[in-house]
Image (cartoon, grey):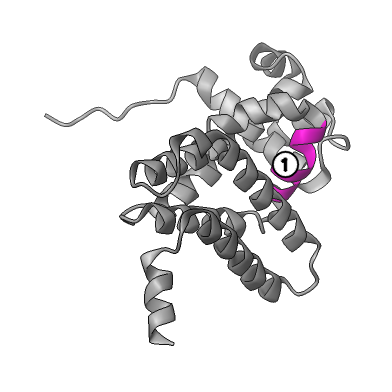
Amino acid sequence: MAKVPSVRPKGQATRTRIVDAAGELFAKRGYQDTSIEDVLDKSGISRGALYHHFRDKEELFVAVLEAVEARIADATVKASRGIADPVGALLAGCNAWLDVSRDPAIRQIVLVDAPAVLGWQKWREIDARYGFGLLKGSLRAAAEAGRLSPTLIEPLAHVLLAAVLEIALLMARANDAPGSVKQAKAALRELIEKLLGPSPKTVRRRKAV
């Protein structure tokens, strides 16, 4: 018997359409220069339909941010999948984040607008379900492998998050993008390996020199 394909409920399809349209506008113009009217024009959705799903522009921005954070989390998980060494997995995930942060849309929504629009605490609560949560998970795996004390997971997660965000912003301001990426990844590797010890890949590279 043939399987009947699932059909996305109309309400969910409308919500996705609104979020996609708003995401494109926020990425291109920024939060402050994007109005609800702009979103209505781009999405072709009625005002009533939009307000059925979102109370105001900030709530719509949160939905866009969550979608972007999920995309980033997916990229970091894929990059670290199959790497047994926790330090190597952490490095791979952080490098993936630096790669995706070069996308102007991600930079605008996550690094520029999110802290300003939502405030540090609310932004952090959202990120804790995505990037920050993955970072803590990586450090937890490193602690289980004896690479750091479990009591240091929380503070080190904050230290590394701040470092990754600052490095991403530094890359965004750099004129020589390819060179800045290489330097950024080297600096992040140096920091992580000073804190947790070298990954097997680094050890092999040093022995080969």
Name which residue type carries label 1: Ile
Left or right position of 81 against 111: left
Q: Residue at x 53, y 30 (%)?
A: 129
Magenta part, dominant SS: helix
Can residue 113 be seen by looking at this rendering?
yes
Residue 119 in which image quadrant: top right
Q: Residue at x 72, y 25 (%)?
A: 121
Q: Position of residue 96 (x, y in %)?
A: 53, 57
Q: Residue at x 65, y 33 (%)?
A: 64
Left or right position of 1 against 11: left
Picture layout, residue 98 above or below residue 127: below
Furthest residue to the left? 1
Q: Position of residue 38 (x, y in %)?
A: 81, 33
Picture layout, residue 128 above or below residue 170: above
Give the quadrant of the C terminus. Answer: bottom left
Q: Secondary structure at mark 1?
A: helix
Left or right position of 14 against 42: left
The residue nearer to you, when weighing 84 against 203, is: 203
Q: Which residue is mark 1?
A: 109
